Image (cartoon, rainbow, N blue to C red):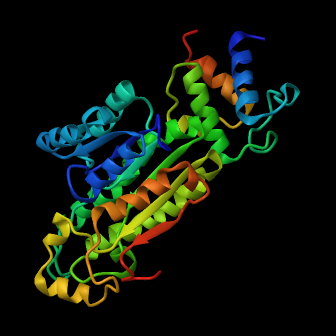
Amino acid sequence: MSLENKVALVTGASRGIGKAIAQQLVAAGAKVIGTATSENGAAAISEYLGDNGKGMALNVTDSEQVAEVLKAIEEQFGSIDILVNNAGITRDNLMMRMKEDEWDSVIETNLTAVFRLAKAVIRGMMKRREGRIINISSVVGTTGNPGQVNYCAAKAGLTGFTKSLAKEVAARGITVNCVAPGFIDTDMTKALTEEQKSAIFANIPAARLGAPEEVAAAVAFLASPGAAYITGETIHVNGGMAMI
Amino acid sequence: MSNIEERVKKIIIEQLGVKEEEVKAEASFENDLGADSLDTVELVMALEEEFETEIPDEEAEKIKTVQAAIDYVKAHSDD
């Protein structure tokens, strides 16, 4: 299996896309540490990973906790070879009504935390001349979406972050890429209103929501040795809704 | 040549892939030894590990020559 002896960290792995990613990386042979914000979530991750990894509680907006958890992972599993920044939140509101804390919390969790985690793993990857950082962005980071100026700004920010870091570390055998899901069948999209959903469906040539596993497949590919020459790229997984 | 000097030079030779005779005290990593900015960051990382110390970013930025690296380690090492 292509990810044998590799250690992967997947944030936001208790459900949805993150869970599917963790399971596919395990299927490819990796040891996976999945994080969730709550102890309950971490326990659920431990349960589905079994002997192939572990769930850990992590609030990605807490620098000290990130350092502690990373240390614990290195001691127990070794250096992280694959980082998948999947944890994300939405705080939707029209711009006219959006509060500053709705803006801040989305930028902090969806963008700043990616900087924080990447920084924590990059040193080890530089030393080993090998590594994969995969950021889960979103189609709306490219297309925009009403009611989501905060979310779209954070996701578009990830693209710039990804390209810049990819250029910095490419010569060290580390790739940095994005996977940009369209509308995927998860709790996050269940929160959309019927009005939002029907508008979205009219624009998806595949005429259905995507499955979390279909996003995870793109992540598993980018994590694999075969993707070593792909960096700074975004793979869109959106059923044709935006061809960019 | 002191032990520290030898160890620092050995790391520079390994990290930058240069010849021993090129690693003169006044040699600049970027101008004389062909290092780019990321090479210099990695060199500082290697020094941190060899001498089990943490070099703060603002100090690391000043380590641009072989002599500066030796001086820093000498000033901050318990060996």
- Determine the residue located farthest toward the right in the rendered image: B21
Q: Quadrant of residue A209?
A: bottom left
From the viewer's side, name the closer residue of B37 and A76.
Answer: A76
Q: Is residue A164 left or right of residue A33?
A: right
From the viewer's side, name the closer residue of A21 and B18.
Answer: A21
From the viewer's side, name the closer residue of A154 and B31.
Answer: A154
Q: Quadrant of residue A217?
A: bottom left
From the viewer's side, name the closer residue of A221 and B49.
Answer: A221
The residue that appears at 54% across and 53% down in the rendered structure is: A175
Q: Is residue B49 left or right of residue A69?
A: right
Residue A54 visible here: yes
Q: Is residue A90 above or below residue A208?
A: above
The residue that appears at 37% across and 82% down in the rendered structure is: A143
Q: Is residue A15 above or below residue A41?
A: below
The image shows residue A17 at horizontal and vertical percentages of: 28, 59
The image shows residue B2 at horizontal and vertical percentages of: 73, 10
Q: Is residue A192 left or right of residue A200?
A: left
Q: Is residue A104 above or below residue B15?
A: below
The image shows residue A163 at horizontal and vertical percentages of: 53, 63
Residue A62 visible here: no
The residue that appears at 39% across and 42% down in the rendered structure is: A8
Q: Quadrant of the N terminus of chain B?
A: top right
Q: Is residue A193 left or right of residue B12?
A: left
The image shows residue A110 at horizontal and vertical percentages of: 30, 60
